[in-house]
Amino acid sequence: LVFSQAVRTLFRNRAYLCVTGAYLFGPTAVVLVQSNLFMFCKYVLHDPSIINKCIPCVQATGLLCLPFWVLLGKRLDKRSVYFCSGTMLMVATGCVFFISTELEAIVLSCLAGASLSTMYMIPYSMLPDVIDEDELRTGKRREGLFVGFFTVMLKMSVTISLTLANLLLKTFGYVAPVASCGTPQAAAEADDMPEQSDMALLCIRLLCSLIPTSFVLIAIALVWAFPITRERQATMATIVAEARRHRIAHPEGSQGGGDSHVVRAPVVSKLMGANVVDDDVSMAEMQRALSQQAMEDHIGEQVADDSDAMKFKFQAGSRDGIEVTV
């Protein structure tokens, strides 16, 4: 595919847009807090050393809670897990706007760390479902196309968060500290924190609280709009397995001489028009078409076997001098 065709293919897939959007806005919120947390501790809490306690709390709780989210994902669907963890992260980042003590910062760091891993884990776990659905609709495995654009979202999240933070800080009148490199006098001047205006302090609070909260809310909405539910994914897995069994049994109907990465199921030939199936084609319709084609193939095989048997009897009768009437 050329670049323009690849982009059109991606933007026509609703499930892919939802999962890539979540992978863009969720990490953007995380990077916004990470890149501005030191300024928050320095100018709002007036103690830069607090960050040395917040970061271990985030990492420790994130590591400890990761098995919990995995176990919860086995009982609930991925959307519900993302909704629960995203709500926790929204509460944590939203409350950052109001804190003023070290203890409050540590408690919110633990709460945010507990839900942080799902911002990356859940969208990545949804991507294979999108690829399987695309395989059913097009008959092709295009992991490279989907994963390539998907990984770009993480780089874009870093770019967006840093650009947005620098733009807002400059707009609200943030005063950068003196560079500590150079003479001892410059290093001594750098130890003195510059006086920040109320608008600059408000901007730092927003960059660590309400703005990341809004990005997490957008990510939650996109994941909740993800069209592939747990039941739909199970149905797709069944159809893909049947399609691959059909390809193995009928290699002449597969594309690329029996390529194991390409599924040319009967559902593709029946439901796709110009190599793409419309989004309103349901999994039930795909499964019915696949079952119908499998039944037709089975009947065709029986007819072929009966024809071969009659041909054998006819040849045997002729060889023995027996009159055969058909």
Image: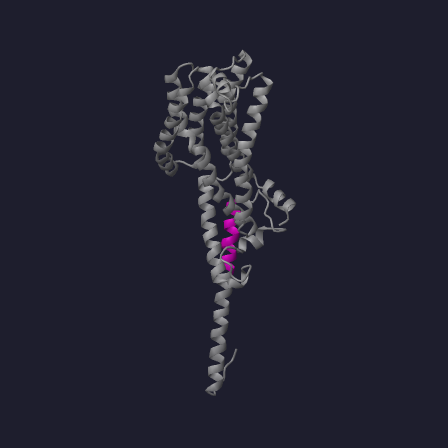
- Please report the residue visible at 51 percent of the width from the left and 33 percent of the height from the top: 22
Q: Give the range drawn in magenta.
A: 282-296
- Please report the residue visible at 55 percent of the width from the left and 28 percent of the height from the top: 162
Q: In which quarter of the image is residue 153?
A: top right
Residue 18 visible? The answer is no
Magenta-span inclusion, residue 271:
no
Between 108 and 249, the residue placed more toward the observer is: 108
On the image, the x and y values in percent for residue 206 come to: 51, 19
Q: Compared to 313, does 235 lie above or below?
A: above
Task: State the scheme by which the image is colored.
Answer: one colour
On the image, the x and y values in percent for residue 275 come to: 61, 51
Relative horizontal placement of residue 307, taking residue 3 as reference (left or right) = left
- Please report the residue visible at 55 percent of the width from the left and 39 percent of the height from the top: 152
Q: Compared to 301, does 216 lie above or below?
A: above
Residue 19 visible? The answer is yes
Relative horizontal placement of residue 91, taking residue 145 as reference (left or right) = left
Between 291 and 125, the residue placed more toward the observer is: 125
On the image, the x and y values in percent for residue 108 come to: 40, 22
- Please report the residue visible at 50 percent of the width from the left and 72 percent of the height from the top: 307
On the image, the x and y values in percent for residue 274 come to: 63, 51
Q: Is the magenta stretch mostly helix, strand or loop?
A: helix
Magenta-span inclusion, residue 293:
yes
Between 72 and 164, the residue placed more toward the observer is: 164
Q: How many marks?
A: 0
Residue that lies at the very extreme toward the bottom in this rendered image: 321
Q: Compared to 4, does 213 lie above or below?
A: above
Q: Compared to 201, does 251 lie above or below?
A: below
